[in-house]
Amino acid sequence: MDKEMINRLRDWANRYNTPDFIPSDPVQFPHRYKEQKDIEISAFLTSWISYGNRKMILRKAEELHTAMGVSPYRFITERRFEPYQQQTGAFYRFYSWNDLYGICDRLYELYQEHPTLEDALLQYDKKDPVVAVRYAFEGIKGVPRTPASACKRVAIFLRWMVRRDGIINFGLWQQYHPSILLIPLDTHVHTVALNLGLTERKAADIRTAREITAHLQKIWPDDPCLGDFALFGYGVNNPL
């Protein structure tokens, strides 16, 4: 990676890693809350539906947060998701209402045993939070267990929780370090990375995500997902 590309990526990261990014991004929803448990649940469920058309994501997330009300944590612990059980109608794209019940029920179980979601995940894997999420939410639709999956939505959630610059991401979790985060490999990130030569791999899988992340670690060794704002932000605003 030459100096010109490094400077370009740093410039893009600085341009898009700003509070102006929040209102147009799904991260706006967990930003509505102050308590860690509310933020964790809002962030996890929002990232779970973060695929497809952005306007559709924001609209469905708004509906979900209207249902959860002032406290997603109370929504979970008071089991107000109970009516969704066995409801096979579509909730969002390939998710049914029963799928929403399933993920809420798993969150309920985890919070019954642990004070925070971070504490829960640490019981599954202390070094790799992607692996921890996969095991904690085993069998939940939308949380892939296949080794080849880039786990984009999981990576989005972890970026929100772990990155600590306090601009867009929350930095609530201290046991996982930002240096171990994996870039969320969405279409924009992949396309820009291919154009820049950060990868030659056409498959949007875990190997490609790791390859791109490894290049970004050369610029930001302690915080490679700062590069997500460079690639994603530029890709959204300058379609190739």
Image (cartoon, helix red, strand yellow):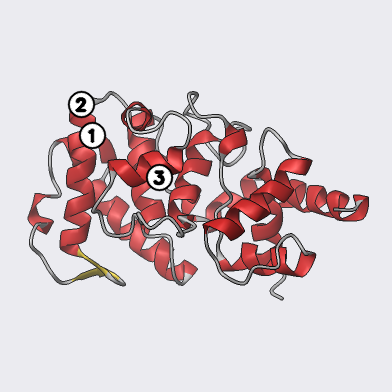
**What amino acid is found at the position of numbered circle 1 in the picture?**
Leu
Residue at the spot of label 2: 113
Task: Give the residue displayed 23% in from the left and 50% down from the top.
Answer: 103
In the picture as drawn, the residue positioned furthest to the bottom comes out as: 240
Front residue of 119 and 69: 119
Left or right, residue 42 beside residue 166: left
- Tell me, for residue 59, which label it has, or none: none
Q: CA distance from mark 2 to mark 1?
A: 5 Å
In the picture as drawn, the residue positioned furthest to the right comes out as: 3
Question: What crowding class fits label 2: few (fewer than 14 Cα within 10 Å), some (14-19), or many (20 or more)?
Answer: few
Left or right, residue 45 beside residue 178: left
- Looking at marks 3 and 1 on the same chain, the residue that comes earlier in the sequence is marked by 3
User: x, y (%) of residue 12?
Assistant: 77, 53
**What amino acid is found at the position of numbered circle 3 in the picture?**
Ala
- Looking at marks 2 and 3 on the same chain, the residue that comes earlier in the sequence is marked by 3
Question: What crowding class fits label 3: few (fewer than 14 Cα within 10 Å), some (14-19), or many (20 or more)?
Answer: many
Assess whether mark 1 and mark 2 are in contact (beta carbons under 8 angstroms). yes
